[in-house]
């Protein structure tokens, strides 16, 4: 008999598991936040703040831009690829050998990673890192033309990334968000590098760790969480893991089949109503990144439109979801104008059925003010009314 989890409890469990149930105050434990999340996604776009800084600040507003980079340089986290470039707690490293091998095999069989560089030239890249210490891609120059396209890279960059993806190189630090490569043996502690868990142990750890952070999920949810295994591998793990079958109620009253760990009943009983503070959530935040889960649990249809031509955008270039309690109540289009030291609010849209009450507007204005202080903006410019407009009404 599957355990049924009603929609309210499902939403609250998900937010609680992701560190968004309590007010984001107190002394920051950045490594603890990343440990709780499993990883934090890196992103170069600094519309207001870069995604990783915004995600961590959303969970503790004593966090400051650059704190994550300092942890990376200090060796408390390591950088690699989950579903995207991410920082993970250093203790995760022994369970990441599986991912290094997956990428090594993937790159050996994909034409994109074939650069036609001579073996001696590739060896020379590694030797330079060995002799000179951490180097960025700017320290190298290859004459061959890269493949055309948005994600094209010069040959030396592709070869550096191949060594990075396969675990030969690691990120020693970032400077102005530029990655510096070093030998993994000089970045990762020896006691972690030398652990050799069997593949099945690594897969079991990754899948269980995913469900701890998800609370409940389908095979696809588990597989996508780390981006470290195929759907078939996740399905095989689920079949033999002794999980609790659950039925999770969607926002519209329908029920979805899924799985959870053995302590799910206790976790559901322990859920509490989240803080009523209004939060502006980054589009790459774990609670918003899985658009299907976001729509299923909250009835919030969200897409980021940074790659959509301006004329075809429904909302805007970089529009942020707004979370209040256990509901997504709207979205906001804003940008930091660093030249003028102003945070510019371009538009606010409230979801259907959400009223722009004085109290709600005050909570929004307070959050915008906190974000302005976070990114060092002295001024807030509202290019729209704080009460916003109805969904679908676009200026």
Image (tube, rainbow, N blue to C red):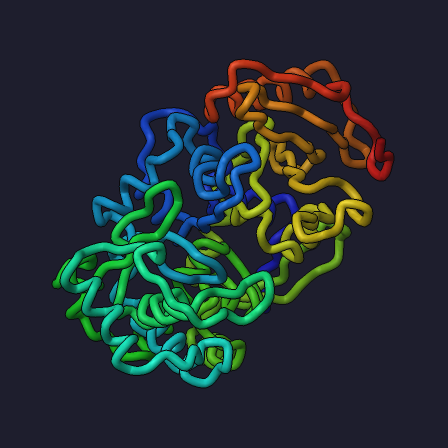
Give percent across and percent down for residue 110.
49, 81
In this rendering, does residue 32 appear at all? Answer: no
Q: Residue furthest front?
A: 143
Quarter assignment of residue 342: top right
Give percent across and percent down for residue 381.
65, 17
| Residue 21 or residue 264, whichever sits in front | 21
In this rendering, does residue 285 appear at all? Answer: yes
The residue sitting at 58% across, 52% down in the picture is 289
The residue sitting at 57% across, 23% down in the picture is 367
The residue sitting at 55% across, 47% down in the picture is 284
| Residue 183 or residue 188, whichever sits in front | 183
Residue 243 as seen in the image, left or right of residue 202: right
Give percent across and percent down for residue 76.
24, 47
Q: Total number of numbered labels?
A: 0
Looking at the figure, which quarter contains the N terminus? bottom right
The residue sitting at 63% across, 62% down in the picture is 247
| Residue 214 or residue 112, whichever sits in front | 112
Q: Residue furthest bottom?
A: 109
């Amino acid at each position: 008999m599957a355990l049924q989890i009603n929609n309210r409890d499902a939403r609250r469990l998900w937010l609680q598991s992701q560190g968004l149930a309590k007010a984001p105050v107190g002394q920051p434990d950045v490594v603890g936040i990343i440990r709780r999340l499993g990883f934090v996604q890196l992103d170069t776009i600094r519309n207001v703040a870069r995604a990783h800084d915004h995600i961590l600040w959303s969970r503790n507003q004593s966090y400051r831009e650059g704190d994550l980079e300092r942890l990376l340089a200090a060796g408390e986290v390591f950088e690699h690829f989950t579903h995207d470039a991410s920082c993970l707690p250093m203790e995760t490293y022994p369970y990441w050998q599986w991912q290094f091998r997956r990428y090594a095999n993937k790159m050996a069989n994909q034409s994109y990673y074939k650069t036609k560089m001579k073996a001696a030239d590739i060896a020379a890249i590694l030797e330079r890192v060995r002799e000179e210490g951490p180097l960025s891609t700017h320290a190298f120059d290859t004459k061959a033309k890269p493949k055309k396209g948005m994600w094209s890279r010069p040959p030396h960059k592709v070869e550096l990334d191949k060594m990075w993806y396969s675990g030969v190189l690691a990120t020693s630090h970032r400077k102005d968000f530029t990655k510096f490569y070093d030998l993994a043996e000089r970045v990762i502690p020896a006691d972690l590098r030398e652990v050799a868990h069997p593949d099945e142990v690594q897969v079991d750890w990754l899948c269980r760790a995913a469900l701890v952070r998800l609370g409940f999920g389908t095979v696809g949810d588990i597989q996508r969480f780390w981006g470290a295994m195929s759907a078939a591998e996740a399905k095989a793990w689920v079949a033999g893991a002794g999980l609790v079958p659950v039925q999770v109620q969607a926002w519209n009253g329908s029920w979805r089949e899924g799985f959870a760990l053995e302590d799910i009943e206790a976790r559901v009983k322990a859920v509490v109503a989240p803080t009523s503070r209004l939060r502006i959530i980054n589009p790459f935040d774990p609670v918003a990144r899985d658009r299907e889960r976001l729509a299923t649990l909250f009835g919030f249809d969200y897409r980021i439109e940074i790659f959509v031509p301006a004329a075809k955008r429904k909302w805007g270039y970089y529009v942020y979801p707004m979370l209040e309690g256990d509901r997504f109540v709207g979205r906001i289009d804003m940008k930091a104008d660093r030249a003028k030291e102003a945070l510019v609010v371009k538009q606010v849209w409230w979801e259907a059925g959400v009223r722009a009450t004085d109290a709600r507007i005050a909570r929004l204005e307070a959050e915008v003010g906190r974000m302005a202080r976070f990114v060092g903006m002295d001024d807030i410019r509202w290019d729209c009314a704080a009460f916003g407009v109805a969904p679908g009404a676009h200026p």
